[in-house]
Image (cartoon, rainbow, N blue to C red):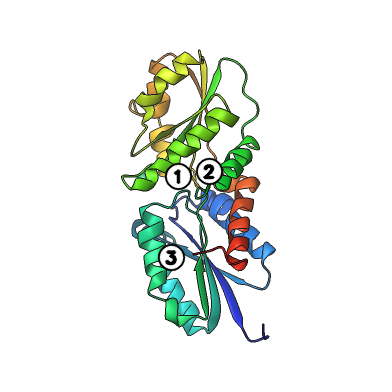
């Protein structure tokens, strides 16, 4: 490796318009990656056009999408690029806005690899559940946790099923429901009753506690998860932190970058 070889890591996430939350989650992950790989320059891209539009207009904060960021890196003479998504599952975002866009840049760099999202192969699930334990203390009887996943119509929605199975084995009392795709909140309420839970802790299973967590999960509207569970007779506690704030999840991304350097990216 010669001195002039410019190496970069492009950290790609959906993005968020919540500035404080962005610092605590996305930026914290980017910083952790930068600290662990000092030979690489860390760059940022957001996939959401809506989020990028709001940030540009409201805050004057211009953030590239994957393709624009890669083009800049090419123009600035980067030779080796690792793209590390902060996504949870290999769903539509991962395939359409990262893998597909990266494919168009294959010939532009000596090396271009894409890292895995949080949930990919079986060891990832075990690690993800172990990392969640760092956030959720052992549950007392009568208490359950409901994780709000995003969910998708993409076949990768099945990842949430594998996560739920791993949780059943290793963290009994933790259930997952999705905003989109199966299962949804009404599907898991019978499980909460089966467990004789009186208290339910609601927590986003997303990188960022943004719009879905604040409104759909913890909002005061009558169709929020908090309101629905209260009507079902549960005491509800809100845990409003995204996975990106959890150092153990930050470490998963660091490991997935390391896998790319070791030749295990795609
Ligand atoms: Co959404």
- Horizontal side of residue 189 vs 204, given as left or right: left
User: Do tag 1 and tag 3 residues touch (Cβ < 8 Å)?
Assistant: no
Q: Residue 230: horizontal and vertical position, in percent?
A: 42, 18
Answer whether residue 56 is visible to the viewer in this image: no
Q: Which residue is mark 1?
A: 210
Pair 3/2: label in front: 2
- Of badges 1 and 2, the one in the foreground is 2
- In the image, what residue occupies the spot 36% across and 31% down? 184
Residue ID for mark 2: 242
User: Where is residue 264 shown, x and y percent of the image?
Assistant: 56, 63
Secondary element at image label 2: loop
Which element carries disc 3, helix, strand or loop? loop
Image vertical order of residue 108 relative to residue 170, above or below: below
Residue 73 in sight here:
yes
Task: For marks 1 and 3, give the CA distance.
Answer: 20 Å
Q: Position of residue 249 (x, y in %)?
A: 60, 47
- State left or right for residue 180 relative to residue 169: left
């Amino acid at each position: 490796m010669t001195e002039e070889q410019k190496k970069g890591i492009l950290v790609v996430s959906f993005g968020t318009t919540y500035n404080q939350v962005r610092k605590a989650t996305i930026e914290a992950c980017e910083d952790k990656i930068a600290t662990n790989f000092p030979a690489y320059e860390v760059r940022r891209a957001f996939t959401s056009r809506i989020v990028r539009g709001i940030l540009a207009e409201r805050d004057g904060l211009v953030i590239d999408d994957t393709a624009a960021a890669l083009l800049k890196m090419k123009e600035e003479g980067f030779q080796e690029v690792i793209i590390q998504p902060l996504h949870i599952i290999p769903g539509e975002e991962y395939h359409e806005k990262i893998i597909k866009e990266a494919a168009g840049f294959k010939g532009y760099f000596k090396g271009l690899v894409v890292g895995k999202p949080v949930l990919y192969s079986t060891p990832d699930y075990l690690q993800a559940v172990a990392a969640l334990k760092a956030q959720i203390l052992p549950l007392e009887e009568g208490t359950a946790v409901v994780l709000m996943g995003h969910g998708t119509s993409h076949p990768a929605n099945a990842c949430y099923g594998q996560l739920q199975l791993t949780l059943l084995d290793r963290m009994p009392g933790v259930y997952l429901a999705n905003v989109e795709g199966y299962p949804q909140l009404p599907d898991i309420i019978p499980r909460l009753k089966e467990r004789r839970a009186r208290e339910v802790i609601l927590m986003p299973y997303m990188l960022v506690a943004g719009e879905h967590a604040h409104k759909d999960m913890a909002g005061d509207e009558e169709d929020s998860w908090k309101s629905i569970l209260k009507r079902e007779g549960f005491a509800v506690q809100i845990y409003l932190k995204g996975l990106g704030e959890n150092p153990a999840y930050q470490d998963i991304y660091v490991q997935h970058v390391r896998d790319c350097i070791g030749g295990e990216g795609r």
